[in-house]
Image: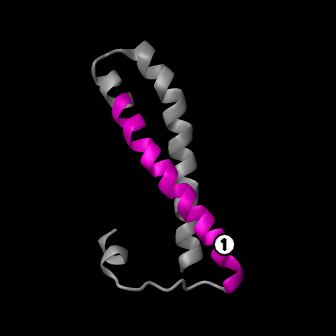
């Protein structure tokens, strides 16, 4: 995570046609990752407090968001290599 942040310029290494695909995957991954932080925290807290009825309600949203976040992550890594 810190390597791309500390670099002054990071060039896209893939072919020109893949640039829109790369940025689409990257933006969707970032948006889903930001949404996932509070979802995962609430899901974990509710499970640790044994409030399983409320845990299940939010876990139904957390798992699909997490799985949707993982796919663009692998796609953006594949596009950037």
Q: Residue at coordinates 67% horizontally, 77% vertically from top-left? A: 18
Magenta stretch: give its range: 16-42
Position above or below: 55 against 33:
above
Q: Which of 80/34 is in front? A: 34
Q: Which colour scheme is used?
A: one colour
Q: Residue at coordinates 71% horizontally, 80% vertically from top-left? A: 17
* Classed neighbour count for the residue bearing mark 1: other residues with Cα under 10 Å, few (<14), some (14–19), many (≥20): few
Whether 66 is among the magenta residues is no
The residue carrying mark 1 is: 20
Whether 22 is among the magenta residues is yes
Q: Is residue 45 toward the left or the right of residue 25 in the image?
A: left
In percent of width and height, residue 29 lies at: 52, 56
Q: Residue at coordinates 54% horizontally, 41% vertically from top-left? A: 65
Position above or below: 70 against 78:
above
Q: In which quarter of the image is the N terminus?
A: bottom left
Q: Number of numbered discs present?
A: 1
Q: What element carries label 1?
A: helix
Q: Quadrant of the C terminus?
A: bottom right
Main secondary structure of the magenta stretch: helix
Q: Is residue 18 toward the left or the right of residue 58 in the image?
A: right
Q: Residue furthest toward the right?
A: 17
Q: Residue at coordinates 49% horizontally, 35% vertically from top-left? A: 62
In percent of width and height, residue 76 lies at: 55, 68
């Amino acid at each position: 995570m810190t390597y791309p942040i500390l670099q002054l310029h990071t060039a896209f290494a893939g072919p020109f046609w893949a640039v829109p695909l790369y940025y689409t995957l990257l933006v969707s991954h970032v948006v889903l990752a930001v949404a996932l932080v509070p979802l995962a925290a609430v899901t974990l807290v509710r499970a640790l407090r044994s409030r399983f009825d409320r845990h299940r309600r939010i876990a139904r949203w957390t798992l699909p968001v997490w799985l949707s976040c993982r796919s663009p992550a692998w796609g953006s890594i594949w596009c950037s290599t």
